[in-house]
Amino acid sequence: MKWLRRVGIVLAVFVAILVVWVGVAAVVYSPEYVIRVLSSRESEVSDYLDGFPLRSLAASPDPYTFAEDLDEERVRGLFEAEFGVSGFDAFLSDGGTTSFIVIKDDAVVYEQYFNGNDRDSMVTSFSVAKSFDSALIGIAVDEGFIVSIDDPVTDYLPELAERDARFRAITVRDLLLMASGLDYQEMRWFLFNGDDPLTTYYLDQRDISLTNTNIVDSPTEYFQYNKYHPQLLGMILERATGMSVTEYTQTRLWDRIGMEYDGAWALDSVESGFEKMEAGLNARAIDFAKFGRLFLNGGEWEGTQVISKEWVAESTIVDPDLHNPGYYRTDYGQLVYDEGRGYYQYMWYGKLRDSGPADIVAEGDRGQIIYVSPTNNVVIVRNGTDFGVALADWTDTFYAVADEL
């Protein structure tokens, strides 16, 4: 039975190492953070709807309602032809879709809900939130709270320069472009020190973004998806406006574009009370469609310029100086670049057309999408608990269907 004793010794050593590993992490970070990381797997919708504390957004006092011009059978036929499926509603339901809305010429032509959801069901944004972050920065520029996106981030977050003078070379624009030169490694050997768990589960996102960000390259050299960027932008918004991100969202967007329902920003923790800028905006699908409509119309809403036309254009139109494969040098960057057809601007994805303005996309994990085609006057919203198909397949199909609507 010597082998049993050996197995027991190995298991005991493994358990001891595990206990020490978790114990060290709990001391270095916090027990609550360690519990969050160990209890998490891949991010799920429930994480943002009820796994984090929430700060409420109230429905607009002047709600906007889309007209209806339902043509659902035609819409189903177009998507069935593009996806090569029969039974589009079943295809959506089986793929984890919770809501799917198509708007053409300011009227809803298709609106369906699946898997126990309806129009009043709250859905989460995941990284769609980043496009809202960009819009809020643009409004703050319009209002003069932020002087220029070419300001060094240290004008608003001087602590960064105290830690490393090189932060003075990083601008607000670099954060918006995801081209700051800051290090971002989703996972590291210690697990708890990976940038993805830290920017998702750490209980004080302000602190971790100010103290755990490190410069590895010069800004604007290349695109790299990095969740510290939206966190830093959130702090800039707080300090520049003197408001919480939720208050600024409420007064500058939610009220002005007629959100019909309450929403909420997920927070890092009750104690910190900082909005999860990377993924934490929750709303109804029909209200996400209104955000798409706002950008479809160049920032104008029912006769009022909510965001300047200049910002809408600058934040969504490809920068030719950056549009090259060397700038999109990571694997994910090459997926975005799509052999020259795609690009990333200020937290919006773009898909170039042969003529006319590009289509723009706010997209997030699990297949959360706001798709805007100015050329075709189309907005498409898809939310789900899972992707169903790859994000690129969704957006490629939206691109084709928008031409046919």
Image: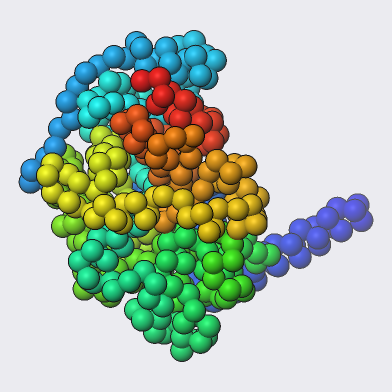
- Give residue 78's quadrant in the image: top left
Image: 355 above or below 38: above
- Give residue 393's quadrant in the image: top right
Image: 380 above or below 3: above
Which is more toward the observer, 65 or 50? 65
Query: Does residue 110 appear in the picture of this structure?
Result: yes
Which is more toward the observer, 277 or 115? 277
Looking at this rendering, what residue extends furthest in the front direction? 355
Query: Does residue 203 appear in the picture of this structure?
Result: no
Could you say where residue 265 lies in the image, as x and y percent from the top left? 29, 54
Residue ID at (65%, 64%): 188
Image: 334 above or below 102: below
Residue ID at (48%, 40%): 351
Looking at this rendering, what residue extends furthest in the right direction? 2
Could you say where residue 9 lies in the image, as x and y percent from the top left? 81, 62
Number of numbered discs: 0
Q: Is residue 43 left or right of residue 302?
A: right
Could you say where residue 215 lies in the image, as x and y percent from the top left? 57, 75
Residue ID at (47%, 15%): 80
- Name the quarter where the C terminus is drawn: top left
- Give residue 21's quadrant in the image: bottom right
Q: Is residue 382 left or right of residue 2?
A: left
Could you say where residue 6 lies in the image, as x and y percent from the top left? 87, 58
Residue ID at (36%, 24%): 114
Looking at this rendering, what residue extends furthest in the bottom direction? 162
Q: Is residue 359 left or right of residue 265?
A: right
State how the image is colored. rainbow
Looking at this rendering, what residue extends furthest in the left direction? 61
